[in-house]
Structures are given as C-alpha cells and as structure tokens.
Amino acid sequence: MVNSPAAQEHTLDRDCMTLSRHVLQQLQSFSAEAQDLSAIMNRIALAGKLISRRLTRAGLVEGALGFTGDVNVQGESVKKMDVYANDVFISVFKQSGLVCRLASEEMEKPYYIPENCPIGRYTLLYDPIDGSSNVDINLNVGSIFAIRQQEGEDLDGDGKDLLQNGRKQLAAGYVLYGPSTLLVYSIGNGVHSFILDPSLGEFILAEENITIPSHGPVYSVNEGNFWQWDDSIREYTRYVHRHEGYTARYGGALVGDFHRILLQGGVFLYPGTKKKPEGKLRLLYESSPLAFLIEQAGGKASTGMEDILDVVPDKLHARTPLFIGSTEDVQLVESFIQEESRRESEKKAIASS
Ligand code: P6P
C-alpha cells in the first residue's frame, strides 16, 4: 500500500533530522560556538562511520583483527582496531580546523594539531575503541568522547589544563557499534540518540530527551572480581542475590552495558579492589563523559563517595571506581559503601582512644 502523504511527510522529516541539524536546533542559535559544536559532532559522526565500516568488514580484511604486539600507556595489550580507531579520530579532526588537541586512552600525551590551534580552542578526549576485547568475537564495542575548551596555554604539552572536573565538559557521548551503529550525545540540553542509516550515510534521529528510569532491574558487574572487592560491594552483591527483581547483565564492554542501563534502568558497577582501590575505568574519557550523559538523563554517577562529575583528576589517565545508572540504584550501592566507611572510621576512633 502506498504510504499516505502524511506518513511520507513524517518519514521525510525524520530522515532529514540529521545529527548536525539537531545540534544547531539544540542550541537554538547559529552562534559561532553552536556552529563549532555542530561541526565537531559532524566529525565525530564521520569517525563513527569509518570505524563502523571497518568493524563490519574486519573479519574479511587482512590484518584488521588481533593484537599489534604493543602495550599502551594503560599497560594493556593493543588491538589493531584500537590503533585504527585512534588514527581515524586524529585524521578526521586534522581536516576539521576546530580541534587543537586530542587526548586518548591510546596516547600517553595529548596529540596537538598546531594548524588548528589558532582557530579552534577545543580538545577532544576519547576512548577510540572501548571494550576491544569484544572485537575479535564480533560482540559490541564503542567509542566514548567528550569535548572541552582549552584553558590557558598548555606550554609543556601534557594537558595540565584538562585536570578539571567533569562539569567543564561542553559535550559528551558515545558511538555504540552493535547490530546497528548508534550515536548518543548531549551538549547539556538532554540526551539524544541517532541511528546510522548506511543507505544515506547519515545518523538519523532515533530518540530525543532520553530519560533513565529512577530504578531498574539490571545490575552490571564482573562478579569474577568478587573476592577482590571491599566488604561493602560484596554485601551489595549478596543483597541483590537475595532480593527478587534483579537481573545480572555484563557484556565486558562499558558502552553496551551503559546503553542498556540508560534505556532500561539499573546500575553498572566497576568497583576498586583491595589491590587497585582506584578501579580500572579512566575518568576523563570513560567515566566523566558517561556521567555527563547520565545526569542529563536524570540518573547518577558516583565514585561511591562523591559524584563523578566533581572529581578533579591528578593525571590525564587517572582512574576512579564507577557506579552509574538509575538514581535509586546508585544510591543503594553508595549506602553500602558509606556504611562500611562509617564502620571503619568508628573502628579507628575506638583503636586510637
Ligand atoms: P573486566 C574494556 O576493557 C573496559 O575498559 C570496559 O569497556 C569494560 O566495562 C571493562 O573494561 C571490563 O573489564 O575487568 O570486567 O574485563
């Protein structure tokens, strides 16, 4: 049956709501900053398309999968896809004229694009492929990004001006490479998702103003680390084991686990351990961008003791524990952590009296 004129008009309107148009609308202005952010988001979309295309064909392309044999600044074995994705972001921003500096999980120091610096004072912080252990087994991975303004002169080039809290972020988001390629972003005016239409080569608006439920059934944590956790996290885990209405989901890639919780509610946990109290996830280009999004969606992101967005890192690749998701579920985790902290303080007070 031929679509009615109204249905055809709706389809056209939807197909015309591209990412760059949406960003401009979001800012209700066509100011210089609005146009800058729209152009930057467009470049991020291009990076997402290039990485998505590579991932889709990785199994067919000689040398696309597997390890490079190198170890990155995180001490992690580097996947060929990590390097490819990192280079894609550098390449698309070299031609952009807007981003002066890129700070990546894969690079010890920020990467400068000098020819852009007189024009654009923006810094892109990103994890080019998050969850790369999933790449060789064809499971979802993601790219995480945040945009900040450069403050002052970074004379020794190590990005000290980036060591500020997450409320300094101008924009944040991720690309989820799954059955479809999804881009989720916020510039501080709600959280919005776009689906890549390969036939158009455009990210088309899927959902506006995504709001996370105040509570959800999902708890997402690697329980293989159970005996390395503090008692508080073990107590929390025993609690959800004993109470109905909880379900465990853990995909081993932060972006996919986060996206499920954003839409369905619940909490993602990456606690510290006795050996590594700071945890595994990096603040500036993993936890902080997702914290920006979750607060925009009405949720919460915490280290267990304070909001992720209030944490000021001491170094570019600083790590923090991460508890993120529905407000009620994150608060439940915090209650276990803060109760144990109170008990520890009491013990110390008694011991010292
Ligand atoms: P584990 C992937 O390496 C990553 O950085 C996140 O994407 C993911 O949430 C986490 O680490 C998984 O870590 O220790 O559970 O394998």
Image (cartoon, rainbow, N blue to C red):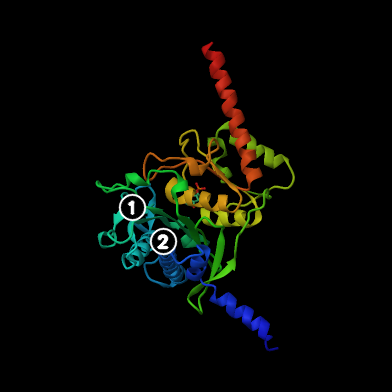
Q: Is residue 136 above or below residue 9?
A: above
Quadrant of the snapshot with the C terminus? top right
Task: Locate residue 244 relative to residue 32 in the image: left or right.
Answer: right
Quadrant of residue 269 within the rendered picture: top right
**Measured from the top left, where is residue 48 in percent x and y?**
45, 66
Residue that label 1 marks: 107
- Does residue 183 show up? no
Identified at 48% across, 67% down, the residue is 24
The CA distance from mark 2 to mark 1 is 28 Å
Task: Locate residue 189 relative to residue 47 in the image: left or right.
Answer: right
CB at disc 2 and ligand 1 closer than 8 Å:
no
Q: What element carries label 2?
A: helix
Outermost residue, bottom side: 2
Quadrant of the snapshot with the N terminus? bottom right
**Measured from the top left, where is residue 83 in percent x and y?**
36, 60
- Does residue 322 show up? yes
Decide: few, some or many residues near mark 1? Use Cα within 10 Å; few <14, some 14-19, many ≥20. some
Amino acid type of the residue tagged 1 in the rendering: Met
Q: Is mark 1 on a helix, strand or loop?
A: loop
Q: In this view, does 253 lie above or below 222?
A: below
Q: Which mark is residue 33?
A: 2
**Measured from the top left, where is residue 238 in percent x and y?**
66, 37
Residue nearer the viewer, 27 or 86: 27
Q: In terms of sequence position, does the residue under pointer 2 or pointer 1 come before the other?
A: 2
Identified at 69% across, 41% down, the residue is 241
Q: Nearer the viewer, mark 2 or mark 1?
A: 2
Amino acid type of the residue tagged 2 in the rendering: Glu
